[in-house]
Amino acid sequence: MGRSLDSRILALALARMVDAIANSFLIVVLPLYIGSQIVSLPAFVGSAVSLGVVKFAVTPELLIGIVLSLFAFLNSLSQPFTGALSDKTGRRKVFLLTGLALVAVGSAGYIFFTDYVSILLMRGLQGIGAAFTIPVTVALVNELSAKDERGGNFGLFNTFRLLGFGVGPLVAGVVVVAGPYTAFDVAISGFEAAFLVAVAGAVSSFALIALLIEDPERPGTEAAEDISIAIRNRDGSGLDPVFALSIATIVMTLSLAIFAPLANLINARLDQGPFLFAAQFGATVLANVVFQYPLGMLSDRYGRRPFLLGGFVLLLPTTLAQGFVLSSLSMVLARFLQGVAVAAVFAPSLALAGDLAKGGQSGSTLSLLTMGFGLGVAFGTLSSGILVGFGFAVPFVVATALGAVGLVLVYTQVGETVDESVSAPTAGD
């Protein structure tokens, strides 16, 4: 099957990779930064909180989870609106540049503010910025792709994006540990250097978009009119397949996101340093880098559904194992195999949603999946800090149970779109 690579997709992928390096720096650095003595934490840390019959302690891990989840909540919940607005206006480039500017400002803010509330505000600003960029980039990839190349193009795009996420944590661990630095007789701590790298990444991505991307020409008739979220299928039987995929995406991403807030506990449990934790975090991303593109291309040929189901089947044991392994190497292996599972799901699910998107509604349709990805991060990072109070393995056990729900949803609610002999429902109807 011959393939032709659109240079605009490659440009989007490169820009997203640079931005991903910057953001993944923060995913690794912020938990370490908040857990250090540099950041002033609220006075109520260590106190107990009761929510009905549930009682838990306010720990640094919980505060870390709140910071990470705020980004994800603001990012994901805003995406249907920014995606639909970009559909209506067709101004993709303006949305991308605005979002990247907000991310850069937030990264710079960490250098100047060292109290917990300010860090929370900076991360929230970055969440809003990400909401302007993510649905627009995937909409562009979808609109620039033929149906028989869509899975491969999404796989390529995600490969570059995740390559940035994979490289970022590894470099971040080195940058933090190797500090402090001196530049022009100015002392720069390891944390400050990491934040400067994040700023540079956002600015570089801004420059790539400004120079290489133009808004595609679209007929006025392609503007999205109905931006409501379809929950039930058009014939009334079961859920809309894109909505079902968005729920499955939430639980899949939750399984990944519970790891980062537990950085300090994992390091203590496995008797390891920040670099090994960064390697474990990056192992999942590395697997995505290796497998996402080929699996996306295979989904163009053999269908989306086999990869979706196989990915969820592999997700369950690899998530559960992380709550019980007792060596750093075993954790790296579990995380890598979990990444293979995610690679089998992510590109085919975006391609399937793109197959079902109506003309001119790529942003609003695909934003359901990108929103699901963000919500999974939000719920995962927030719940991880709470659930770990009941035992180290509890967050991983709960995530595995939710992953089983995702598997059932995909099996029962999501049909095939590649085989034209299969009648697939239309998203949004």
Image (spheres, rainbow, N blue to C red):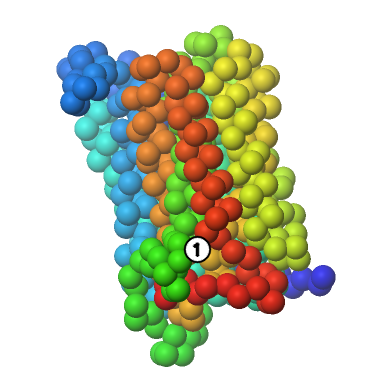
User: Where 194 sits versus 18, above or below?
Assistant: above
Report whether 396 appears left or right of 46. right
* Residue at image coords 74%, 54%: 294
Q: Residue 316 lies in what quarter of the image? A: top right
* Residue at image coords 33%, 46%: 73
* Residue at image coords 64%, 41%: 313
- Closest to the observer, 166 or 191: 166
Per the image, the residue denoted by label 1 is: 241
- Closest to the observer, 116 or 75: 75
User: Where 395 sits versus 303, above or below?
Assistant: above
Q: Residue 226 lies in what quarter of the image? A: bottom left
Visible residue check, residue 96: no
Residue 196's x, y, as percent?
A: 43, 38
Residue 97's x, y, as percent?
A: 40, 63
- Closest to the observer, 75 or 188: 75
Callout 1 amino acid: Pro
Residue 22's x, y, as percent?
A: 48, 43
- Closest to the observer, 151 or 75: 151
Visible residue check, residue 360: yes
Quadrant including the C terminus: bottom left
* Residue at image coords 37%, 59%: 79
User: How many other residues sit within 10 Å of disc 1, few (<14), some (14-19) or many (≥20)?
Assistant: many
Report whether 77 appears left or right of 149. left
